[in-house]
Image (spheres, rainbow, N blue to C red):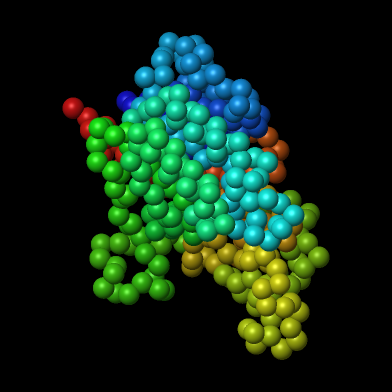
Amino acid sequence: MPNVLSIFSGGGGIDCGFKKAGFDICFSTDFWKPACDTLERNKVGKMVVCDDIRNIDYVGSLETLGMKLSDIDVLVGGPPCPAYSKSRFYRTEKKRALEDENSFTLYEYFRALDEIRPKVFFFENVFGFVYKPHQAAFDLLKEKADEYGYDISYKVVNTANYGVPQKRERFICVGIKRGEGEKFIFPEETHYDPENTPEDQIGDKIPWVTCGQAIGDLDYDLPEDAEMQAGSKHKDLLKLVPPGDNYLYFTAERGYPNPIFKWRSRYWSFLLKLSPEKPSWTIQASFSNNMGPFHWKNRFLRISEIKRIQTFDDDYELCGDFREQWRQVGNAVPVKMAEVIATAIKKQYFKEE
């Protein structure tokens, strides 16, 4: 099996996807203990190192496994992304991209790439990474890949188009060391939006996977559902929001008789409710009382449900308290999306003899 070294591993979305595709996860690392505990609990890989990425000694860590840098075939990771997120456009007090205090994470990805020089690297981030205000970071990725001898292919993917029950857009870049093969070709999309796709563009694709299909069988009553009401002080308004809608339902522009909110005055996820007939919107990293998506039955989603939406296996055990588990799932790359890309990488560059 090709060997993978994973950095910024989080709760294991990328690692689990590559493992499902037939890769051997040799080494994973993250600075956050609940995430590291999750990786350990599920035996995702051979070794987990819980430390600041700036302290990681790749040579020494691999030596404990009896391995060398040259044994690593693929480097994977998604540097923490707040500085490139859509929300940062609203957080004017925060700096963006390379000016952000956490920009060192991007440079640490390049340090790992420089030291290891694997055959392939997989880099993931929020789709805002390609926005014009973040051009310097995007340019740095391209420059470093070229400097270290890699040809890159990149794409902003909508995970719903690959069978994930979630409309989650992510930037994915795959680099191939020169001389090891042609540029990576992204796999064809397998699913389509049944509401907005012309018939002549459907081909062999199948409709998006809906929330009803993904989590409908998990809808049962629990005592804690009544303790803290979804929507917080707006819980009564949430009950009026049609499935698949949000606070904009209560605006003049949408024809609400006595408008309560101004158009685009809140985050899109405010009072956002899932529809059982559509995929979920992006599961956020932070649990919130009034920011969705919420269940169509006017309650918070449960960990078991957001795991399904992020395509983790039901038996994948998350460590930490409720909010820590939520953060691990919300921050993750959907396992199925990682598996689709990993399968394409394996097919193109690690053909079994």
Q: Nearer the viewer, residue 23 or 93?
A: 93
Relative to 291, does residue 142 appear above or below in the rendering? above
Quadrant where the C terminus lies? top left
Q: Residue furthest left?
A: 353
Residue sitting farthest toward the right = 233
Q: Quadrant of residue 180?
A: top left
Q: Is residue 87 left or right of residue 310?
A: right
Identify the image quadrant of residue 40: top right
Q: Is residue 99 above or below residue 203?
A: above
Percent position of residue 317, x then y: 57, 35
In front of the other: 2 or 171? 171
Return the x and y of residue 18 as percentages of the image width and height. Answer: 40, 36
Q: Position of residue 59 (x, y in %)?
A: 48, 16
* Residue 24: quarter of image: top left
Which quarter shows the N terminus? Answer: top left
- Name the residue at 60% across, 36% down: 104
Residue 309 visible from this viewpoint: no
Q: In this orientation, which residue lies closer to the viewer: 252 or 131?
A: 131
* Rendered view: 270 above or below 100: below
Eyeballing the image, is 114 above or below 67?
Answer: below
Q: Residue, x 41% and y 19% (percent of image)?
A: 69
Residue in view at x 60 percent, y 48 percent: 97
Q: Is residue 347 left or right of residue 311?
A: left
Residue 52: x and y in percent read 63, 27
Residue 53 visible (yes or no): yes
